[in-house]
Structures are given as C-alpha cells and as structure tokens.
Image (cartoon, rainbow, N blue to C red):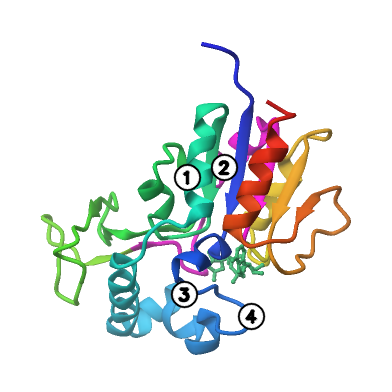
Amino acid sequence: MKNRKKLVVLTGAGMSVESGLSTFRGSGGMWGQHRVEDVATIDAWYKDPEKVLDFYNIRRKELSGVYPNDGHIVLATLEEDFDVEIITQNVDNLHEKAGSTHITHLHGELMKVRSTGPGAEVFELTPENLEIKLGDKCPKGYQLRPHIVWFGEAVSEMNKAINITEKADVFLVIGTSLNVYPAAGLLNYVLSGVPVYLIDPNEVNVNGKNITVIKKGAGEGMKEFKEMLKILK
Ligand code: APR
C-alpha cells in the first residue's frame, strides 16, 4: 500500500448546519434558546437530571431525521487518497453515516448512554429506543445518563486527539468557532510547517496563525478543499 499522507480534520457544529442542525453560538444557536447551566453542565445533572435527560431526548429525536450533507460526504471520499482522522466536537453521528471510518468524538455521542456506576459502561441506543428517563438503569442497576461530555467534566479523548494532531501532514478545521477548550487548543499541537486550512462562512479568530481560510459553508468549502488537496497528495 502506498504511503498516504495523514489528513487530520477538526469539526464543529457548523459541519452539520447544512444537514439542518443548529450551531451553539451566534444567531439561532442552541445556547440562545437554552441556558448551558440548565442542561449541559455536570451541576445541572445533579440539580435537575430530568430536565437534562429531556433536553438530550429531544436532541436525539431531532437527529433521527437528519442526514449527512455534501461536506460530510466529500470528507468521507478523501479516505480514498489520504489517511483521514476526524476529531469532532459534534455529538451527532453524521460523519459515521457519511462513511468516514476514523472518528474521535471529543464531546461524546448522542446515540450512546452510559452507566453512572463504577466503570461507566457505555450502551448504544437504537432508533426504536431513543429516550432515557429517570429510573432507566443499566443491567447492574445504575441510572443511565447521556454519553456527553458536559461543561465541568474532563475530556477523556483529548490525549488521543493531541497524539493524532501531532502526526498530521495536513490539518483542516471545519465549522467551529474555536471558543471551547481544550478542543480549540488542538491547533497548538499542529507541527510547524504543516499546512492548515479552515472552512467557515464566518470570521473565526485564529490568533494570527498562518491558515488558509476557505470562507464558505461546509459543502461548498469541502469541494474547494478537495481540489486544493490534489497538489498535496
Ligand atoms: N458550514 C460551516 N461552518 C458553519 C456553517 C456552515 N454552513 N454555518 C455556520 N458555521 C460556523 C459558524 O460560523 C461558527 O464558526 O460554525 C461555527 C459554529 O460554532 P459554535 O456554535 O461555537 O460550535 P462549536 O465550535 O462546534 O462549539 C463547540 O461548544 O457548547 C459546546 O459542546 C458544544 O461541541 C460544542 C462546543
């Protein structure tokens, strides 16, 4: 097999906008409609677990009618020529549905739940069974919770993401405002000299880093990026 270049891609909520999902910040963003402190922090879970479960039950139902967009699909096709590693902040499963095979979910996965007991065993939900309620327990008798990294919790996949980032030959950022750490700090682990690209229709603050910006949405932006990659192959 030929020695393929490693393309590492960091994605955020903007990746899934053209599939019909909301971003978190900016106009129409999720955090304009719900208070983070009520539904997405570890303290919210202790204070009002029912409210938190309901929030994620609704998100899960929304996801069941949502499909990958051109951005996800073009990105999946890049595996034909590159060793592609996706590091996503998204909890949706649209990269998987598009056919990408190496995906690290930094902030968890909506379609999974886990035990609040020792070992935090993870279970996959099925499309027929999208809700968890207070009283829904794992086989060992512990309450189930969303498999989501809430504010105030450790990002357990971060070290893996850093290792992947350090090996990138090309690094691409798509659809993230780079506001949330530690994910946003991954850019600092890209080795010097590695070309970095960013696809976003809006301005993103990248602190003077040398980045080639493609100021487009994920679908159009990915098509343009794929053309640019031909010279790097
Ligand atoms: N294509 C690509 N990017 C887009 C599109 C589009 N069609 N539409 C909007 N965007 C961009 C916005 O311009 C913005 O830069 O997507 C980005 C979304 O930013 P955020 O809403 O801040 O989402 P994200 O960066 O993924 O948030 C990080 O915050 O609350 C948490 O856990 C949540 O994982 C999330 C984290």
In what element is the residue under mark 3? loop
Residue 17 vs 1, above or below: the answer is below
Q: Secondary structure at mark 4?
A: loop
Residue under label 4 = 26
Residue placed at 64% from the left, 40% from the top? 226
Q: How far separated are the C-alphas under marks 2 and 1?
A: 7 Å
Amino acid type at image mark 1: Thr
Mark 2 and mark 1 residues within 8 Å of each other at the beta carbon: yes
* Residue 193, image x, y percentages: 83, 33
- The residue at the point 57 percent across, 65 percent down is 14
Marks 4 and 1, how far apart at CA: 25 Å
Nearer to us of marks 3 and 1 is: 1
Q: Amino acid at mark 3?
A: Thr
The residue where tag 1 is placed is 104
Query: In the image, which residues are magenta?
Result: 147-175
* Residue type beneath disc 2: Ala
Q: Helix, strand or loop at disc 2? A: helix
Identify the mark nearer the N-term, 2 or 1. Answer: 1
User: Which callout, 2 or 4, points to the residue nearer the camera?
Assistant: 4
Mark number for residue 161?
2
Question: In this rendering, would 91 be left or right of 233?
Answer: left
In this view, 2 is above or below 165 = above
Instruction: Tell me if 59 is positioned left or right of 74 in this view.
Output: left
